[in-house]
Amino acid sequence: MSINTERDIEANMQIGPTDKGMVRIFIESQGVEVPMDFEPEEAEEIAEEIRAAAQAARAITD
């Protein structure tokens, strides 16, 4: 499976700060929970990667 492989799976995602000063991305799907904690700097890097991917995706569809 690659990033371009489509799957018909629903998942819920929540993003927010923890009481420990981390940023948590929490994904739940089909009874499986995946909490991922990141330092604020790491979370900012992830946000930049998401923005860059969104820009690249727009370039493909424009």
Image (spheres, rainbow, N blue to C red):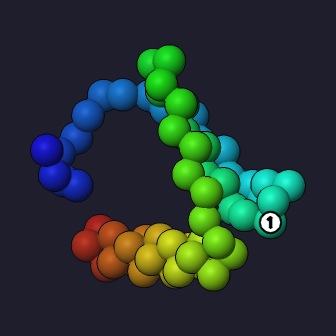
Mark 1: few/some/many CA within 10 Å (<14, 14-19, 20+): few
Work out which quarter of the rendered image holds the N terminus and state it.
Answer: top left
Answer with left or right where residue 13 lies relative to residue 49: right
- Residue 14, by quadrant, is top right
In this view of the protein, can residue 62 be seen by the observer? no
Choose between 53 and 19: the one closer to the eye: 19
Q: Residue at x 58, y 43 (%)?
A: 35
What x and y, as percent, mark residue 46? 51, 73
Residue, far top: 31
In this view of the protein, can residue 38 be seen by the observer? yes
What x and y, as percent, mark residue 24? 66, 54
Q: Is residue 16 above or below residue 47?
A: above
Q: Secondary structure at mark 1?
A: loop
Work out which quarter of the rendered image holds the C terminus and state it.
Answer: bottom left
Which residue was labeled with disc 1? 21
Q: Is residue 59 above or below residue 23?
A: below
What x and y, as percent, mark residue 56? 33, 78
Answer with left or right where residue 44 lies relative to residue 10: right
Choose between 47 and 55: the one closer to the eye: 47
Q: Residue at x 60, y 65 (%)?
A: 38
- Residue 6, by quadrant, is top left
Q: Residue at x 51, y 38 (%)?
A: 34
Q: Is residue 51 above or below residue 23?
A: below
Choose between 54 and 47: the one closer to the eye: 47
Q: Amino acid at mark 1?
A: Gly
Choose between 59 and 17: the one closer to the eye: 17
What x and y, as percent, mark residue 48? 52, 81
Q: How many marks?
A: 1
